Image (cartoon, coloured by chain):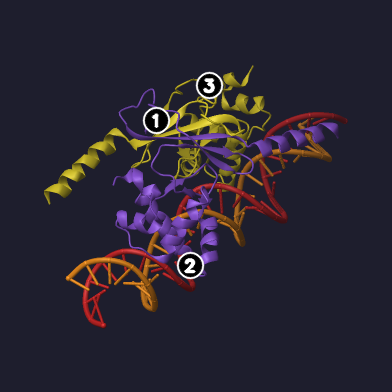
Chain colours: A yellow, B purple, C orange, D red
Amino acid sequence: MNIQGLGRLEPREQLRAVGLRVTAPRLAVLDWLSTHPHATADQVAVGVRERLDSVSTQAIYDVLNACTQAKLLRRIEPAGHPARFETRTSDNHHHLVCRQCDRTEDVDCVVGFAPCLEPSSALGFTVDEAEVVFWGLCPACAVRQSDSHHIEESV
Amino acid sequence: MNIQGLGRLEPREQLRAVGLRVTAPRLAVLDWLSTHPHATADQVAVGVRERLDSVSTQAIYDVLNACTQAKLLRRIEPAGHPARFETRTSDNHHHLVCRQCDRTEDVDCVVGFAPCLEPSSALGFTVDEAEVVFWGLCPACAVRQSDSHHIEESV
DNA sequence: ATCGTTTTCTTGACTCATTCCAGAAAACCT
DNA sequence: AGGTTTTCTGGAATGAGTCAAGAAAACGAT
């Protein structure tokens, strides 16, 4: 089994497959994240504590870091945001982030493999990943924005 | 004069052009950054203090924020790094970052205008910028890396 | 199943980048 | 030059994340 197939396994098997010990915090984090993509460490802690009733903050960070290193999780860090984690790791997809409400969504890679676009001049660098963040406004905030413009103008 | 031409002006005129007061810390920051692209707030503080012998840390942050908002500076925040600032603002260029030594270089935009590539599905988002970071190893670190591999293997 | 080793988790202190605050100082307008 | 507004100073505070030492749990061999 190659790394591509890991996403389809249960957390327990995923951990085994990459040689990490199977522990309650790890299972809970992987499981919770699988239904809550782009969550922060803080949000993961809250989610996990609902079903595990006592996990230290440090454990959350340890789990997130260990799994990220083992490529069971992917970490993204949009400018100005705390890190966010997701279980979708085996493809090279990118992200769409709302400047206003921080809503974050996946977008498929324009090309399909990493690095998905070559820099026009690499200056001798060995490039292994092109990270793309599309910044803008989500539909809800776009509406809110034009509403408040309207209000400002009419005052 | 449009925003595109600002980069060619002296700091004093740049500030005037965007309606910011002309102060010693602002002039020093803009001037120093013009010859030290991709510097952190900390590095800016050190550089500026060499020629101004007393600027508070807060002033550095205020200047960087004010100028970034006025688009005299551009702020980039590669994952895991403190924010970096540069005076090249009028184009939509991207960055190449060395995973090992943090060396950061400009790369011209593949397309030339923002957003330089459309997400394949925008989910209703209004996208105004595509931020691209190419991650890899700079030539120096690539050499160092293969050297240490060599050493490990031969032990 | 149990023991011993290794890894992970807990608690609590700590770092770093950055921001908040209140008052002093400087820049601009007339 | 004088008054107003903005910016700067100094110091405290914040948030995200890490470090460190010992307790607890997981694995692997007996």
Q: Percent from the top left, x then y, of residue B37?
A: 51, 48
Q: Percent from the top left, x then y, of residue A110?
A: 44, 22
**Residue of label 3:** A113
What is the number of the mark on residue B116?
1
The reply to whether label 3 and label 2 mark residues of one chain is no
User: If the image is split into quadrants, where does the N terminus of chain A sit?
Assistant: top right
Q: Is residue D27 left or right of residue A86?
A: right
| Helix, strand or loop for disc 3 | loop
Chain ID at mark 3? A
For badge 2, the amino acid type reads Val
For badge 3, the amino acid type reads Phe
**Residue of label 2:** B55
The reply to whether label 1 and label 2 mark residues of one chain is yes
Q: Percent from the top left, x then y, of residue C27?
A: 33, 68
In space, the residues marked 1 and 3 are separated at their CA atoms by 18 Å
Chain ID at mark 2? B
Of B5 and C4, nearer the camera is B5
For badge 1, the amino acid type reads Cys
x 16%, y 44%: residue: A150
x 33%, y 62%: residue: B21
**Splitting the image into 4 quarters, where does residue A114 fall?**
top right
Other residues around mark 3 within 10 Å, as few (<14) / some (14–19) / many (≥20): few
| Helix, strand or loop for disc 2 | loop
Q: Percent from the top left, x then y, of residue A107?
A: 42, 26
